[in-house]
Image (spheres, rainbow, N blue to C red):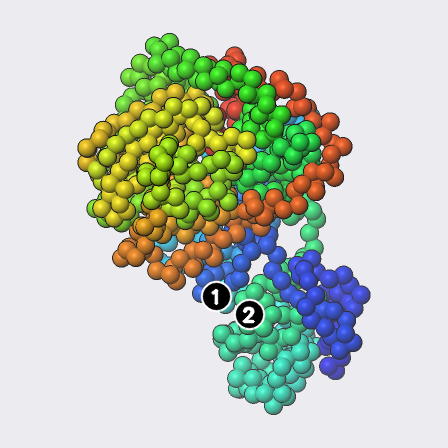
Amino acid sequence: MLRKVSGLLRRGHGQDAAAPRSRLHTEDTDHDASGKGLPQARLPSRIFPDGPRQVSEEETFGLLKLTLHCAQLLQVRRDRPYFAVLSIGSQTLTSARIRAPAHEDVCLTWEASSHFVLQRSGPTLARVAIYRGGKYKGALNNFLECWCQIDLATYFDNEPGARSLPEGGWHDLLSANGSDGSASQHAGRLKVSAAASSPRALESQLWTRLLPLADFDGNGSLNDQEFVMLMQAFGADLEEHDLEGLWRRVADPEGAATPIAQLADRMTRVHSGGDLASLMKRCPVDGAALVPGQDLANLIYMTLVLDEGLAPTTPSATLKGGYSTAQQASRAWMLRMTEWLTHPLAGAPSGILRGNKYAVGGLRLGAQAAHILVVDRRSRLVVEEKLGVVLSLAMRNMYQSRMGRVLMREGFFARLKSMSETKGRYMDSPESVKDIPIFLHLFKDDLNLSEIRDPIDSFRTFNQFFFRELKPGARPIASPTEDSVIVSCADCRLIVYESVDEATRFWIKGRRFSVAGLLADASPERELSAPHARGTLAIFRLAPQDYHRFHAPLGGSVVSITPVPGELFTVNPIAIHSEFVDVFTENKRSILWLDTPEFGRVAFVAVGATLVGSIVWSVGPGDAVAKGQELGYFAFGGSTCILLLPDAHPVVWDEDLLQYGRKSLETLVRVGERVGVHAGSALETPAEERAALATSTAAATAGIMPLEERAQGMDTARDEAGLLMAMSPVASPRVASTLAPGSSPFGWGAELGGTAMGEESHSSESSDGGYVSAT
């Protein structure tokens, strides 16, 4: 009888001794009696929105199977395919491409699903975007049509007063033309459903599915013999009298047999908190060895295997993963091929001289090139900072190759500086006001016009609009009276490091960078820079669409402000990661020294960049400034602020910022948000909370790794791909000319959007969370 049950466990789920192992487990760690290797149950990284991690009942909402059913759009083009892109944290998945049906009732049907393990400390906000395929099978571009956001934790929330889910699972879709939620932006609706199972529900469901295997007479109940035989077939690590004792605890005391539903519920209650591996050594479906002491992981594993075995799906019914961002998932195939040819691992032309080493943000399937990835701190979504194709390739060749460096030395930087000064004068002229509507259109999804203090039509020049002020209260300041708390000085992409050495290891790659160079300290004894030589620093990078006034990260007294002349390189990470330029020591900048109560004397450096010719201070030496008070502003372009704190005053940066920084990921923050605290302060986050947060942010994605780790083996890969170098379309030195002003009022606007402004320009990828930066 026992052999019969064991055989049933294999055959009943479409498995036999020769069946291929499940794709869930990845390694052999156990052996059977004959010595043959047995796979061990391992959860795949694809089910974790923020990277692989261990699961515990206390920190886990549960397992969620999310299904995208269909979308009803107000307008469709029946000659183009449509696909959906789902983003949760750092996981992005995409559906199959389908065309709208020929009849009038327009409904795009995917019926595609995927599983996720939702953690209480992890991301729960999902963003679903609907894209329309471009011409030539999306060779040139795919276009964002509409999107919606869903808080997946709501599916697990049964508390009184909790926000209810939409009736019927329908969610309103907002047009890509805007994201303010107004009725005029309604573009259709999306039907989504989710099967959400808490840890307790998972075990109850598992027993409900497994116990019927021993119901040989089909009466929906089990007796003591059937129950004991089933447990023995599962490999229960209990003696027969212990199994009989377990039966007495879960069985109906008034009958010889117990209904399976009742038995499953009692097994869950009796076993709750126990070791499932003591009742079940191996997965009944694929034979994988369960991991002792990891009940929840084992439950999730067996649920996934059962779903795959009992309900086989076609590829079109499964959401395809392996992407970090929606932009990567939606990228046109021709662009992917171009990027692949120009990526250092594939053999860029400059790789001949081992020059092209730009690699930030990680590599993922579906985007075989490096891109600038940033993390939205509030939603925990990983988004891509989108550069125009031509501009991106030009920057890589200019700043990441020795050939580009040599060519640029031949008068290029003088031309760049002259161009920036000319553009600056134009932006201060009354004629420039006509460029404001174009800028608003280009960055429509990154600007909240309701926050601007003055009406748009009140600005008389473009620069007046560019360094606009916000309404009072638009940026609350964290702990304004606590001297130990550091806040963000700008709306920016922030990266923090506990030491200068760590910053140069993960982020600043210039060979000649030094604290003395940053602070322009030419004194023999390095009196200015010596106290900060091994200090702590934060780098706040502003993109053109950001609010361009910068504020005091700490309260204190202004000691001095020193302007430092220099170049106007871009502050884009492509240049920051260059070994051939030292942006922070060669660029024009201005250094403010601030005496603070908690941190002593700190340096605040405002760094100019391409198209940024002026740094204007609102304070002067001797002024007392409060935390969050305006310090100054930049004119048109992107720029950077650096906060450098002395060695003697250690800082504890917020754990999420630290973890993202170690993955070479910047974090989107706003003015006034807390970013760190003085070590030992009463406001320092407790160690256990920091450990929990570190766990939830340590792996931004499975494919994102620190730059230093990714650099290993890159030279070998570049040599092997040397034959591809001649194929690159950007081998010409003419790439430098792509930064010259063109037909766009800004000289780069049309290129940044990835398409010419016209019929398709309203669907720029930046509207799906991309952050466009020119400098």
Position of residue 159 in the picture relative to residue 571 (left or right): left
Amino acid at dot 1: Glu
Q: Which disc, if any, is residue 57? A: 1
Residue nearest the viewer, comparing 679 with 439: 679
Q: Decide: is 288 above or below 437.
A: below
Alpha carbon of mark 2 to alpha carbon of mark 1: how far?
9 Å
What residue appears at the point 48 percent right and 66 percent down from the top-left corner?
A: 57
What residue appears at the point 77 percent right and 71 percent down from the top-left corner?
A: 36
Residue 95 in view here: no
Residue nearest the viewer, comparing 337 with 520: 520
What is the x, y in percent for residue 56? 49, 65
Query: Label 1 crowding class (10 Å Cα cut-off): few <14, some 14-19, many 20+?
Result: some
Q: Quadrant of the N terminus?
A: bottom right
What residue is pinned by disc 2? 295
Q: Which disc, if any, is residue 768? A: none
What is the x, y in percent for residue 252? 54, 83
Position of residue 153 in the picture relative to residue 461 (left or right): right
Secondary structure beneath disc 1? loop
Q: Decide: is 773 above or below 534.
A: above
Return the residue found at the far front: 524
What residue appears at the point 58 percent right and 38 percent down from the top-left corner?
A: 359
Residue nearest the viewer, comparing 474 with 699: 699
Q: Decide: is 677 above or below 283.
A: above
Amino acid at dot 2: Asp
Secondary structure beneath disc 2? helix
| Callouts 2 and 1 close, C-beta under 8 Å | yes
Query: Label 2 crowding class (10 Å Cα cut-off): few <14, some 14-19, many 20+?
Result: many
